[in-house]
Image (cartoon, helix red, strand yellow):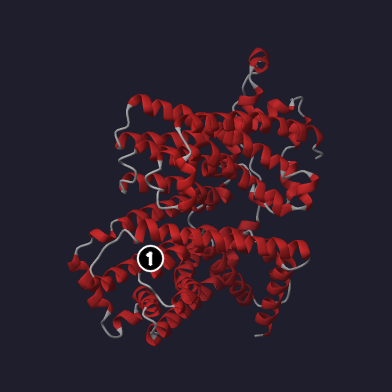
Amino acid sequence: MYYIKWYIQLLYLGLKNTLWKDTEAIVKTLSTAAAIIIGQIVLTNLLYRHVFSNIVIFDEMVIGMLSVFFFVAIIWIYLISLVQSISNFMQNFYKSPDLNYLISIPIPFNHVFSFKLFEHIISSTKSMLFLFSPFLAALGIWVSAPLIYYITIIPLYFTISIIPCAIGVIVAMTGLRLIPPKAFNIVTPMLTFAINVGFALLLTRVQGISSTYIIRIIEFLERPWVADIIPVTGGIRLFYSAVIGEWSSYAALFLLITSFLFLSIALIISKKLFFEGWAKNQLVESTVSKKKEVESDNRKDSNSNEIIEWIKTEWKMAIRNHEMLMGSAIMLLFYLFAIFAFIYGGLFSNNPLLGVSLLITIAAIFNIIAVSILFIPADITKDKNLWKNRYWLLKVMPLEGRRVFNIQCNMFFIPGYIISLVGIIAYSAVNGLSVHLIVLSILSMFFILYGSSAIYTSAELLSLTDYFEGNAFLGNLITIVLPVVYAILSAGSIALYLAKDFVSGIVILSDISAILNFPIVSILSVTTVIITFFFSRLVFVRVWRKLEI
């Protein structure tokens, strides 16, 4: 008990120094918290207006539909928490910097594992909370849930996630003895994406479920003891009880008992497997790979384009950056989810140009950032000095600032454009857009995404200057805000012009769209792209000259 108290105090001290150390840290913490809360509120309203408010059912079917929604959400939470737990195991346990310290001090090994397991559950579940919390809140608005329901969303979410996280730890400890670590880092982001897309599509089809199946779900949930004992149905009963303003004591009790049982199993298995795996991952074996001797061709070397060669090298390193693959997949998920929602949901089928414009706007915001994440090693994300040092080789090479700017732009732009291109063509083909409009959309997206790559490249370098190093929060903020503003002015203005009928009920947007016409949005979009590119290059070149590494 003493060790647990000591570790909790250690975590509290670390959080206090990070979030509440001085005025700058307090301002950063409050600003981040405000941004998260505003983002959650906006996403909740979007889900309610565009998903739940469109579901029209009879009053006697509300209970059944509510149970179905909770059933899908709980299964979704279980699968995502399981995959996230497996994916984060290496980073949170075997590659955790503080684990070496904890093992070196006189603390029992089972306590060390318990400490890390607690951290692992929190870190593996909090990343997806931004998605589940608005969804569950929007569901509560749909059925006019009481205040207690919204208060219990986050505690219930973490409680339900304990069992799949514990199972994920067991699977990871066992699987790493048989499967190489790279397999976990590659497969788990793919599984996470497939699960998110699959359940997003399933939610759009919930209204089409037969009433027979809904009645069966209700009958099963109403069975005494059975629904309380099973963890999945117990979680459903807890959420449903919160909606109707009651409390299911038996479901909560059995869920806690089952969670404790799985945590105990993980602790028992860890006594044999965990530290064997940890010791194995501390060994670094030096292997000498036999490479074929290639005769040097001076003429070929002299004529090779250093930009292309450098980009190829960066792409090879990005592909091997498995630690950041999950973050890249999550950012890319916004665009891919929009593609699936637009295609399978039939959104904007009467006006496919509006759908294309919105997809280009989303691609300009998220796709370039998603690709750029892979080029940043995980161990330098929290240290701006190390982040800046990755430019040292380019800095010492005889390259001008403009050429370095082209290298960085193309490095992000080419993969981002290819990914965006596939989505635009798929949506356009499904909605029967004419060939010349498809070609025009592809060309427009080419210039808009290149401008997005340019502004992100400059914003990233600008965030590494001395001023923004002292104001890290502002430096991180400009790498997000500037691409968003650019995407809204370049592609978003076209989408707003085409969406006059859709935004007629929204006061501010309807007033803006009323003054827009084709010449205005065309000039605004073209001017934004041109000015952004040249201004971004100018800023990059000037900052590059003064940048000290």
Residue in view at x 70 percent, y 54 percent? 473
Residue 418 placement (x, y as % from top left): 47, 33
Quadrant of the image containing the N terminus: bottom right
Q: Secondary structure at mark 1?
A: helix
Residue 301 placement (x, y as % from top left): 66, 18
Frontmost residue, 12 versus 452: 452
Q: Residue furthest bottom?
A: 249
Frontmost residue, 359 versus 453: 359
Frontmost residue, 328 versus 168: 328
Residue 374, image quadrant: top right
Does 163 appear above or below 410?
below
Residue 382, image quadrant: bottom right
- Identified by mark 1, the residue type is Ala
Instruction: Tell me, yes or no, if residue 374 can be seen here.
Output: no
Q: Residues within 10 Å of mark 1 (few under 14, many from 20)?
A: some
Residue 183 placement (x, y as % from top left): 49, 50
Does 183 appear above or below 27?
above
Would residue 317 be found to the left or right of residue 257 on screen?
right
Quadrant of the image containing the C terminus: top right
Would residue 77 be found to the left or right of residue 364 on screen?
left
Residue in view at x 74 percent, y 25 percent? 399
Residue 288, image quadrant: top right
Tag count:
1
Instruction: Tell me, yes or no, if residue 393 can be seen here.
Output: yes
Q: Residue furthest left?
A: 212
Residue in view at x 63 percent, y 42 percent? 287
Does 322 appear above or below 289?
below
Residue 419 placement (x, y as % from top left): 46, 37
Q: Which residue is mark 1?
A: 73
